[in-house]
Image: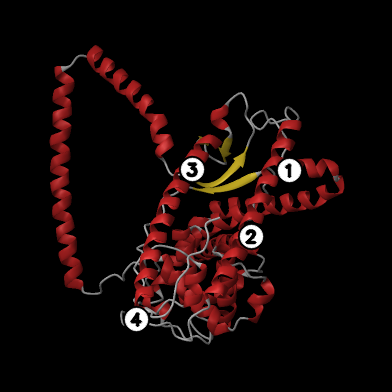
Amino acid sequence: MAGVQFNNKMKRANNLKEALCALCRVLSASGSRWDPETLRKSKFNRPEAASEFWNLLYCLLRQLFPGKRQSSPETHEKIEMADRIQYVKGLLQIQGYGRPAFYNLPDDGDVGSREILLAFSWLLHRVKILEILLEKKRVKVGDHVTICLCPDPEVSTQKPKESSTPSKQDVDVRFLQWMNGKLRFHWRALYAAHLEECALLYQIHSYTQGCHIDKNAGHLSLMEAELIRHPQSCDKVVQAMASEISYLEAYIEWKHVESVYWQWMVTVLESAPEDGNGVPVPIPDTVCTYVTTSAIPPYMPTDVEGLSECLRDTQDQLHKLAGLWKSSQAQIKETETEFGEKELSKIKQEVKQKMERIKPRGAEAKDIHGSYQLLLKEHKPQTSVNKEWSTNDVHVTQVTKRLQADIRKMEAEYHRLQDECRKWLDDIGEELEGIICIPPAKG
């Protein structure tokens, strides 16, 4: 009997080792070397694993959530440990992690490896960091474009505060005009470069029409045309694809033994009691500039009586909903008995036809967001832009119409703000004696 128990323990240990090794192989796609021993030591809250775990988690999160300003790995190495820990804490708080014991860890990085392991596992489960990492490391052979036509939240424009006389510390208007002209120049140069890129892509797609073995694409992409011109570059692409295949194989292996990891995490969570005296840490400014997410959810209340009352209210609401559901099911059965099978099939057919008419309108009204693959489809204009891993296709004219509508709204808002600024300047000019304001010539 003892031998059977020993064999079961050895089998669980081997399965756990396979799970940790597969997980670390997938995480190695971030460029850092993940060691399964670090995860195992963190269960027992070993201090020597804390600093290494902080560094690994920092490098991983900076790759997954680079934000608007991407910095090089050399600059990451120069960042102090305290700043790395504050960044990880702030980003996890923005994502919604609500364990106070994690935020109470010191900034020296010497203790708290078990809490870091729990936070890391929460990211695995809720944020899906493995899937995001594999998507970022995927080799994209086709021509892609990122489109975002989601409605932006309305920004409240406040009227500037009135001031009687300008001070010496105010910025010179000529400097602002020079900066505005420089910004316009760079914007026009960027726009011209983008138009030239689009023209070159169109030439490649039109000249190579019918050369691709994939019938859905029908033409070669920019990378494929470059590989034909320079065959020696194929080795780098093959190496990148081989590494991607190894990460995908590790991910498949991880999915087979993932349940073993979560069973192990149950034991980790049982060995880490929660203290309810934690206070949320403020989010550093460095995190706010790099990450744009929704508001931070509040912590769960620690009052047991309050939770019990909320649970009772929820149960009452569920009972009411169950009663409504039963009554609706009874009404549906009554209607089915009143109508015959032919009448029901006729009604279903009419509803189906109406829904098919509504589908194109709904497709136009939906928010276009994400990475799309550019495909030239002259005979099928409705599939000019094809989104990856999705059957929803978007035509370029649809995107153009949406952009033109946004341009008209922005121009109207721009003219409105101009009028407000003119009125504001007129009010200031009336208070200044002996100064004549001459507006610039319209060009």
Residue under label 4: 278
Residue under label 1: 222
Looking at marks 3 and 1 on the same chain, the residue that comes earlier in the sequence is marked by 1
Q: Residue, x 59% and y 52% (percent of image)?
A: 135
Looking at marks 2 and 4 on the same chain, the residue that comes earlier in the sequence is marked by 2
Q: Secondary structure at mark 2?
A: helix
Near mark 2 (Cα within 10 A), the count class, few <14, some 14-19 or many ≥20, is few
Compared across the picture, whether 281 is left or right of 144 comes to left
Camera-near label (4 vs 3) is 3
Residue 125, numbered label:
none
In percent of width and height, residue 244 lies at 68, 52
Residue under label 2: 185
Q: Secondary structure at mark 4?
A: loop
Alpha-carbon span between mark 4 and mark 3: 50 Å
Q: Amino acid at mark 1?
A: Leu
Q: Amino acid at mark 2?
A: Phe
Q: Is residue 363 above or below residue 286?
A: above
Alpha-carbon span between mark 1 and mark 2: 28 Å
Alpha-carbon span between mark 3 and mark 1: 28 Å
Q: Secondary structure at mark 3?
A: helix
Instruction: Check contact, mark 2 vs mark 4: CB within 8 A.
Output: no
In percent of width and height, residue 257 lies at 54, 55
